[in-house]
Image (spheres, helix red, strand yellow):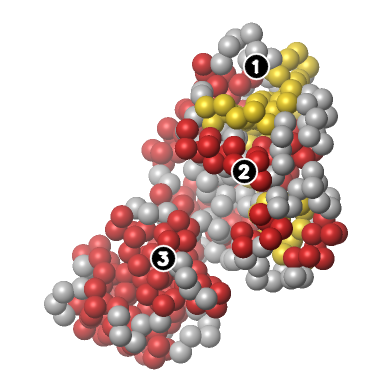
């Protein structure tokens, strides 16, 4: 594509793959950004993730300036979204570059004269600077902060308007980048010195580091050595809530990709046994490799379902981290808000209740079960644990607006 930088070409393709093919934004970007230099990759990430994240706001503007995006050819809609995002939401990009490259993208990708519409709408947006509606109502907040209307209504009802607005605004800010140092092989102070970027200790997490500068975590030699795992502070608190002790027998359900599994192993100092259960064979194989890299030798990975485990099995502690809507991770997964729906949430809540019912039967008398999700919907959190036969000892909710990290719900159940 003549005149199109590699970053914009990659971002345009990612946006199209997400909204036309249902691809996951992070996976699509990984494929499309192969071979880009760090600066171009960073720009591609910012453009692609930002455009996907702000789709609701962008489509509202497109409808005001032209017609609904759903009525446009998909490549024209993608070029418009990408151009408007740069004009209205991204600092440091020249207007002419945003307009000209988006028009060129549409010209190359869409047959006919769709590029003329892109040019006209973007130049009108330059002149008029469209204003989004206020967020005083759930409908206005959904448009202004770019969330599905049903989700804004949910949070307005469950959290109250002020908290809901704060949560949605925080979900659009860049995610904090945290690492968990693998204390089986390294110490936080030593890793901090070797990373080559500024960091500071994570509050209340001795093994946690918050990274303050750009870092290619998976390309760093320490990653290959198993010295750290990129992991949000909220996720680190899950294994801390389990509080596994050396020598105990732990059951980790829905264990892949393995961040919490290997954290449990480190907290146990490699002593005792962790049975990590994953239903998908491919994810289980990846989990085995993660445990190998992280030197978690006391983990045994099994493919299966908790409902089919022998009824005579008992574990000192059980971690259940079931599939969920993931709506606590919108900062790092910009497309997840568009994948969720009330119907999907209801199905997940039914599955979560079934998994919790089966998991609590595998606990020794007096043992501890931790139920955790990375969502902030009551239907998947408080409502699920309310139906458990074990007493709920404690609950904790972390969120981007109150804690500066992913949204997690962590419930501790037991005697």
Residue 145 spot, x, y in % from top left: 49, 64
Mark 1 or 2 closer to N-term? 2
Tell me if mark 1 has few (under 14), some (14-19) or many (20+) residues whose alpha carbon lies within 10 angstroms of its own.
many
Measure the C-alpha gap from mark 1 to mark 3.
Answer: 44 Å
Residue that label 3 marks? 32
The image's mark for residue 362 is 1
Please report the residue visible at 66 percent of the width from the left and 62 percent of the height from the top: 220
Measure the C-alpha gap from mark 1 to mark 2.
Answer: 26 Å
Regarding mark 2 in the picture, which secondary structure is present there? helix
Please report the residue visible at 43 percent of the width from the left and 47 percent of the height from the top: 340
Res 132 → quadrant: bottom left
The answer to the question of whether label 1 and label 2 lie on touching residues, with beta carbons closer than 8 A, is no
Tell me if mark 2 has few (under 14), some (14-19) or many (20+) residues whose alpha carbon lies within 10 angstroms of its own.
many
Residue 274 spot, x, y in % from top left: 69, 28
Measure the C-alpha gap from mark 3 to mark 2.
Answer: 24 Å
Res 335 → quadrant: bottom left
Closer-to-camera residue (75/42): 42
Residue 70 spot, x, y in % from top left: 25, 62
Please report the residue visible at 76 percent of the width from the left and 48 percent of the height from the top: 182
Whether residue 157 is visible: no
Residue that label 2 marks? 290
Res 77 → quadrant: bottom left
Closer-to-camera residue (300/41): 300
Relative side of 205 to 363, left or right: right
Q: Is residue 27 above or below residue 286?
A: below
Whether residue 89 is visible: yes
Mark 3 or 2 closer to N-term? 3
Mark 1 or 3 closer to N-term? 3
Regarding mark 1 in the picture, which secondary structure is present there? loop
Q: Nearer the viewer, mark 1 or mark 3?
A: 3
Closer-to-camera residue (390/2): 2
């Amino acid at each position: 594509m003549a005149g199109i930088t590699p970053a914009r070409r990659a971002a345009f393709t990612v946006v199209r793959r997400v909204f036309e093919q249902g691809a996951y934004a992070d996976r699509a970007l990984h494929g499309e950004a192969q071979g880009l230099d760090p600066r171009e990759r960073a720009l591609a990430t910012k453009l692609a993730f930002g455009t996907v994240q702000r789709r609701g706001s962008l489509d509202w503007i497109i409808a005001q300036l032209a017609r609904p995006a759903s009525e446009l050819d998909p490549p024209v809609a993608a070029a418009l979204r990408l151009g408007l995002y740069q004009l209205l939401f991204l600092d440091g990009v020249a207007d002419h570059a945003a307009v000209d490259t988006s028009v060129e993208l549409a010209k190359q990708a869409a047959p006919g004269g769709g590029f003329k519409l892109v040019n006209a709408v973007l130049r009108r947006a330059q002149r008029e600077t469209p204003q989004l509606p206020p967020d005083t109502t759930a409908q206005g907040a959904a448009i202004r902060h770019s969330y599905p209307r049903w989700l804004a209504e949910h949070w307005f009802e469950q959290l109250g308007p002020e908290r809901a607005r704060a949560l949605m605004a925080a979900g659009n800010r860049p995610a904090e980048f945290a690492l968990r140092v693998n204390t089986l092989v390294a110490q936080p102070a030593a890793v901090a010195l070797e990373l080559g970027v500024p960091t500071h200790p994570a509050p209340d997490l001795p093994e946690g580091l918050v990274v303050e500068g750009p870092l290619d975590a998976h390309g760093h030699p320490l990653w290959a050595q198993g010295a750290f795992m990129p992991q949000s502070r909220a996720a680190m608190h899950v294994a801390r809530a389990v509080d596994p002790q050396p020598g105990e027998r732990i059951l980790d359900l829905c264990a892949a990709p393995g961040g919490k599994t290997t954290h449990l192993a480190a907290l146990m100092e490699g002593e005792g046994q962790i049975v990590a259960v994953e239903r998908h064979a491919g994810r289980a194989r990846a989990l085995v490799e993660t445990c190998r890299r992280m030197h978690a030798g006391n983990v045994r990975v099994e493919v299966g379902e908790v409902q089919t485990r022998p009824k005579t099995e008992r574990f000192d502690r059980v971690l259940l981290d079931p599939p969920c809507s993931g709506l606590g991770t919108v900062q790092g997964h910009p497309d997840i808000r568009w994948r969720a729906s009330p119907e999907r949430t209801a199905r997940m809540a039914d599955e979560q209740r079934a998994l919790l019912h089966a998991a609590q039967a595998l606990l020794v008398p007096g043992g501890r079960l931790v139920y955790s999700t990375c969502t902030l919907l009551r239907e998947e959190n408080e409502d699920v644990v309310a139906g458990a036969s074990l007493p709920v000892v404690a609950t904790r909710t972390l969120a981007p607006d109150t804690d500066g990290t992913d949204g997690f719900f962590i419930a501790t159940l037991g005697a």
